[in-house]
Image (cartoon, rainbow, N blue to C red):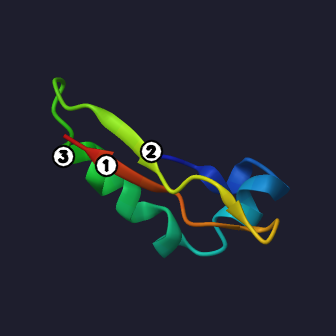
């Protein structure tokens, strides 16, 4: 089990509710060993908003 709730204030601000994080875990669970992982759209907007996305395959 991933206990992101114990990682402090930064984690709480990054993951305000579970539906912001749990889909990533399901997606990574589908990843095959040969799949390439790429992070997209990982820049901050207006100094506070991030819409980081992960591409597999």
Label 1 to label 2: alpha-carbon separation = 6 Å
Q: Earlier in the sequence, mark 1 or mark 2?
A: 2
Labelled pair 1, 2 in contact (Cβ < 8 Å): yes
Q: Secondary structure at mark 2?
A: strand
Q: Which residue is mark 1?
A: 55
Picture residue at 58% right of the left edge, 49% below the top:
3
How many C-alpha atoms fall within 10 Å of the one at disc 1: few (<14), some, or many (≥20)? few
Does residue 28 lie above or below 51 as drawn?
above
Quadrant occupied by the C terminus: top left
Position of 30 with respect to 6 (left or right) is: left
Residue tagged 3: 30
Give residue 5's quadrant in the image: bottom right
The residue located at (37%, 40%) in the rendering is 38
> Are there few (<14), some (14-19), or many (20+) residues within 10 Å of tag 2?
few
Q: Residues within 10 Å of mark 3 (few under 14, many from 20)?
A: few
Q: Residue 47 placed where, x, y %?
A: 82, 65
> Label 3, label 1: how many angstroms apart (C-alpha)?
12 Å
Residues at marks 3 and 2, CA–CA distance in whole angstroms: 16 Å
Residue depth check, mark 3 versus mark 1: number of the one nearer the observer: 1
The mark that comes first in sequence, 3 or 1, is 3
Residue 29 as seen in the image, left or right of residue 38: left
Residue ID for mark 2: 39
The residue sitting at the top extreme is: 34
Q: Secondary structure at mark 3?
A: helix
x 72%, y 50%: residue: 6
Residue 8 x/y as whole percent: 81, 51
Nearer the observer, 31 or 51:
51
Q: Which SS class for mark 1?
A: strand
Q: Nearer the viewer, residue 31 or 48?
A: 48
Q: Residue 1 appears at what percent x and percent y?
A: 45, 46
Q: Residue at x 59, y 75 (%)?
A: 17
């Amino acid at each position: 089990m991933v206990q992101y709730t114990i990682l402090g204030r930064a984690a709480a601000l990054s993951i305000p509710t579970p539906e912001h994080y749990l889909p990533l875990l399901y997606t990574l669970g589908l990843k095959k060993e040969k799949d390439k992982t790429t992070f997209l759209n990982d820049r901050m907007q207006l100094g506070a908003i991030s819409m980081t996305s992960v591409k597999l395959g």
